[in-house]
Amino acid sequence: MRNQRSVKQEFLRKWITGLRRYSCDEKKNMSFLERKKAIKLSADIAMASTRDKTTRWSQALIANASSSGDTLTGSSKNNSSRSRKKMLMMRRRRPKVKSAKKEMSASCIAKRLVEKRTRKLKNLLPGGESIDEGCLVEETLDYIESLRAQIEVMRYLVTASQLIINPYP
Amino acid sequence: MSSRRSRQQSGSNRISDDQIIELVSKLRQLVPEIRDRRSDKVSASKVLQETCNYIRNLHREVDDLSERLSQLLATIDADSAEAAIIRSLINQ
């Protein structure tokens, strides 16, 4: 595990830098949703960049963001709708397993279930669709760890902002 | 245990048992909520499902926090407030 404190500091620094690009005049004219997307996108990118290209999910996340021109119409929404479609298609196409031996079909079902859930997991990771199963576990754990750090820092920012608005609650 | 029967299919097409065990033990360290009641048996599909649910929850949380920040940061004057926040957070 990385040193979480320095990771969070690096993330925060990069995130604030990213947020500054949307600041000043633009900020006043942004809609609520645009601002939210900007915040989320810069947070995701900042977190991915703390990995310094050592993991696939972070590379994919940054690649997705820059291919969409780093605009507010980021590709994160496309990914989720694509994976939702994939999951729907998978459900419809579930094959029926008929076998004389009960043991055989139970094992087949178990295998298929593991495959199906592995696919779901892959779809949840950025760039996960093309990931090799050998790295999947490591990538998943790293991604989860990063998400947790990101969430903690975002929570701090929420608390700090609330205190600035209302210093004496 | 289903993982015993499917063990022969290791390699790049399938998650191996060892990987599942590693995933479970690391997840338990990270997330106390993921616990198997029968702690000696590990069902691969259950672990995968718990992991997916957990990641989905984390995504939802990021989304929710982004929304709240969008509301909060709208009302804050950009430069002075940000500077104060950065200073306090980086020094914690």
Image (cartoon, coloured by chain):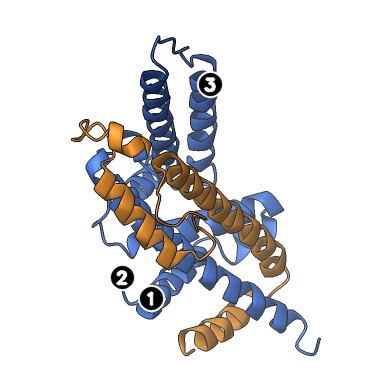
Lower sequence index among marks 3 and 1? 1
> Chain in blue?
A
The residue pinned by badge 2 equals A1
Asked if residue A163 is positioned above or below residue B33 in the image, the reply reads below
The residue pinned by badge 3 equals A91
Say the numbered circle drawn on residue A4.
1
The reply to whether dot 2 and dot 1 touch (C-beta < 8 Å) is yes
Q: Is mark 1 on a helix, strand or loop?
A: helix
Asked if residue A79 is positioned above or below residue A156 in the image, the reply reads above
Which x, y percent locates residue A18?
A: 46, 63
* Quadrant position of the N terminus of chain B in the picture: top left
The reply to whether dot 2 and dot 3 touch (C-beta < 8 Å) is no
Which x, y percent locates residue B21?
A: 32, 52
Label 2 to label 1: alpha-carbon separation = 8 Å
Q: How crowded is mark 3: few (under 14 residues within 10 Å), some or many (20 or more)?
A: few
- Which residue is drawn at the image coordinates 33% and 77% (left, top)? A3
> Chain in orange?
B
